[in-house]
Image (cartoon, helix red, strand yellow):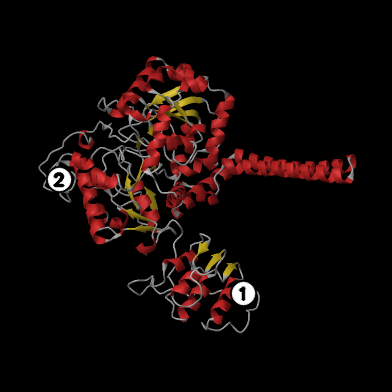
């Protein structure tokens, strides 16, 4: 049996002295001659990056935990292993640690080297992929507006490539997330300490802007099927990751992250990648077997392609003349769903701040929500019948034949039919329809960013569609779901929502709307702050709310004083003190609530800590502590399906 614990030190701000004294008692240096004069200033001895291995990690992982902030690190166990202490069970509980002083002392005694710095948990190692997967594709693109989320003007000013025009680049998240990770404090340059590994592959760039436009590159035998090319591209990336580093083989890919940003997300992902890794996408389609429940495990089966574009339909064009895939690319895809809750995550589309400049959350003018419902998008007039599964075409016909705009204030039309600023129209709308196109539509994010209640149309042959961050947020308190067969009754369904219900939906949205916005990038955050400042300067609503807020705060403080006096005069000293404390607490809570009203409505720059990127990091941190268990997910899914069908809109209203 191990020897008893002989030393247990609780570290606080005085940690170094206690531990250094313990080391000195074992002949490992001397206690400094005296304490520094207050205020005491620690000057960082910044690491040199000149070495090939900048981390110089020759200390055990137990000592690494000293910097992690997780609370407990087996530091003395490391010392014992080095023969520098007594008792194999000695350990140390760390609360707040000045690790630079401590580790430098150990280094001076010849015990390892000081790490060059530790990334924030979860720590993500971003593979530096060969240029054929990322950089070279940017050279082959036919237009600089494609394949990236921003371009640079001659004056080095960034311009967004995501606009409302038909020439806008539809897949900016591919490059935006890559850039965010490269500059994130969660990025680590040491793969040995990484919690996750991100594999950047610009597949959307290749399939949409390079293949068919440029003579090269191609993966395998040239084919009209872009899905085949995409599958071959991802398999090539997987082969490189496997052979260049040992980390895929160490966990069989369980801690590797792949982004599938194209229309149908990971529906056509190679099964070697999908079944093993964490998948990020913007399309959370589930099989019809999921019963409309976007918290299910996905049903475990493959879904049929829902796109109207032949070259992106993964059920067609399976030629088998490619030596790299002699069984065809469909065999490489296998049978799997597009999205598995618990294992994967649906991300919101990237919307730059100008796309929601008129939103009340950005300080836009208070507009009466005089539009009952809005759908302003491509309705498929010039598209094949399979576009959107026919849903947009059906809605357009219902609205036109039923005169919904004139009779019910339900506006459904294209950009040419519904003229005006899109952000203004969304800010005027009570409900916003979310209908798929050839995959993810990006309409859910538009609705939430404007405080408009999303009405998600899904079900039927297309199955349930999980919305962005449905695995993280309780969307049921802010989202209305309508099945395709209920669309003819849409005016009565929306008209039956009471003012109280509508206000509850909107309050829920106000709590987490910023999680649908990518605001972590310094340039985006700076521009968002400038838009808010401009709106606040020019908006009489904001000025009135600021003045009203000040008056309400003054009234609350005055009322708090009067109640204290009344309580003191009306009761005994003990009772009066209790009443005054209760009144004081109640009034302080009221004042805080009044003070938070403006902050809840208008974005503040510090609110970026809860944006889309940090929500992703929070989700990954949870996965780090609670890894996905497929067996547990399947048992929960079986229990849910055994309890009966999902609640329909009609039953919810009752």
Marked residue nearer the N-terminal end (1 or 2): 1
Up/down of 233 relative to 566, above or below: below
Query: Percent from the top left, x then y, of residue 365?
Result: 55, 37
Query: Percent from the top left, x then y, of residue 169?
Result: 32, 43
**Position of 209 compared to 361: left or right?**
left
Q: Name the residue under label 2.
A: 325
Name the disc covering residue 40, or none. Answer: 1
Residue shown at 28%/51% (left/top)?
201
Considering every residue shown, the one lying at the far front of the view is: 1
Please tell me which residue lies in front, 440 or 210. Answer: 440
Name the disc covering residue 428, or none. Answer: none
Up/down of 490 relative to 117, above or below: above
Considering every residue shown, the one lying at the far top of the view is: 402
Residue shown at 47%/74% (left/top)?
79
Disc 1 element: loop
| Corner quadrant of residue 107 | bottom left
Disc 2 element: loop
**Position of 295 compared to 381: left or right?**
right
Query: Percent from the top left, x then y, of residue 251?
Result: 32, 55
Q: Residues within 10 Å of mark 1 (few under 14, many from 20)?
A: few
Up/down of 126 relative to 277, above or below: below
Instruction: Answer yes or no: is residue 299 visible.
Output: yes
Instruction: Answer yes or no: is residue 375 visible.
Output: no
**Position of 627 compared to 230: left or right?**
right
Count of residue discs: 2
Q: How crowded is mark 2: few (under 14 residues within 10 Å), some or many (20 or more)?
A: some
**Position of 143 compared to 217: left or right?**
right
Q: Is the C-beta separation of discs 1 and 2 under 8 Å?
A: no
Rounded to the nearest angstrom, the CA distance separating label 1 from label 2 is: 65 Å
Query: Percent from the top left, x then y, of residue 300?
Result: 31, 36
Residue shown at 46%/59% (left/top)?
120
Select label 1 or label 2 by which is in front. 2
């Amino acid at each position: 049996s191990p020897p008893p614990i002989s030393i247990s030190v609780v570290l606080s701000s005085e940690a170094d002295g206690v531990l250094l004294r313990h080391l000195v008692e074992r002949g490992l240096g001397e206690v400094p001659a005296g304490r520094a004069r207050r205020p005491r200033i620690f000057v960082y001895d910044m690491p040199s990056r000149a070495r090939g291995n900048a981390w110089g990690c020759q200390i055990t992982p137990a000592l690494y935990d000293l910097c992690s902030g997780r609370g407990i690190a087996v530091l003395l166990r490391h010392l014992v292993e080095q023969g520098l202490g007594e008792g194999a069970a000695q350990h140390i509980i760390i609360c707040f640690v000045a690790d630079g002083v401590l580790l430098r002392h150990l280094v001076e005694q010849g015990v390892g080297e000081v790490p060059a710095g530790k990334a924030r948990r979860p720590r993500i190692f971003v593979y530096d992929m060969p240029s054929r997967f990322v950089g070279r594709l940017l050279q082959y693109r036919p237009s600089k507006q494609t394949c990236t989320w921003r371009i640079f003007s001659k004056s080095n000013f960034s311009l967004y490539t995501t606009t409302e025009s038909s020439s806008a680049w539809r897949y900016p998240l591919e490059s935006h997330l890559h850039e965010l990770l490269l500059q994130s404090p969660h990025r680590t340059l040491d793969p040995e300490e990484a919690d996750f590994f991100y594999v950047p592959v610009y597949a959307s760039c290749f399939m949409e802007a390079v293949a068919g436009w440029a003579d090269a590159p191609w993966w395998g035998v040239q084919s009209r099927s872009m899905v085949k090319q995409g599958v071959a591209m991802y398999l090539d990336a997987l082969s490189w990751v496997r052979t260049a580093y040992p980390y895929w083989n160490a966990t069989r890919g369980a801690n590797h992250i792949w982004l599938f940003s194209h229309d149908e997300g990971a529906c056509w992902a190679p099964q070697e990648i999908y079944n093993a890794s964490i998948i990020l996408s913007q399309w959370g389609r589930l099989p019809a077997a999921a019963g409309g429940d976007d918290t299910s495990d996905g049903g475990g089966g493959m879904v049929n392609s829902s796109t109207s574009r032949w070259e992106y339909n993964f059920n067609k064009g399976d030629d088998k003349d490619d030596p790299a895939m002699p069984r065809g690319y469909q065999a490489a895809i296998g049978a799997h769903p597009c999205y598995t809750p618990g294992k994967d995550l649906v991300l919101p589309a990237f919307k730059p701040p100008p796309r929601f400049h008129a939103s009340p959350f950005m300080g836009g003018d208070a507009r009466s929500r005089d539009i009952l419902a809005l759908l302003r998008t491509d309705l498929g007039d010039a598209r094949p019948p399979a576009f959107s599964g026919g849903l947009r075409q059906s809605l357009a016909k219902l609205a036109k034949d039923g005169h919904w705009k004139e009779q019910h204030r339900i506006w459904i039309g294209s950009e040419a039919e519904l003229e005006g600023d899109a952000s203004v129209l969304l800010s005027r709308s009570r409900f916003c329809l979310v209908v798929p196109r050839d995959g993810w539509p990006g309409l859910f994010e538009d609705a939430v960013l404007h405080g408009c209640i999303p009405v998600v149309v899904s079900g039927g042959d297309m199955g349930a569609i999980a919305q962005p961050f449905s695995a993280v947020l309780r969307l049921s308190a802010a989202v209305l779901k309508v099945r395709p067969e209920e669309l003819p009754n849409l005016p009565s369904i929306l008209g039956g929502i009471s003012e109280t219900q509508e206000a509850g939906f909107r309050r829920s949205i106000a709590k987490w709307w910023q999680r649908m916005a990518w605001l972590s990038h310094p340039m985006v955050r700076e521009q968002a702050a400038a838009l808010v400042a401009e709106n606040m300067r020019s908006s009489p609503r904001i000025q009135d709310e600021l003045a009203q807020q000040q008056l309400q705060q003054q009234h609350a403080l005055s009322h708090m004083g009067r109640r204290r006096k009344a309580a003191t005069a009306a009761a005994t000293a003990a009772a009066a003190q209790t009443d005054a404390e209760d009144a004081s607490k109640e009034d302080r809570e009221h004042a805080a609530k009044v003070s938070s009203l403006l902050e809840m409505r208008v974005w503040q720059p510090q609110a970026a800590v809860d944006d889309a990127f940090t929500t992703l990091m929070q989700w990954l941190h949870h996965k780090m502590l609670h890894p996905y268990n497929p067996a547990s997910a399947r048992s929960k899914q079986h229990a849910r399906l055994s309890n009966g069908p999902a609640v329909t809109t009609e039953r919810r209203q009752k």
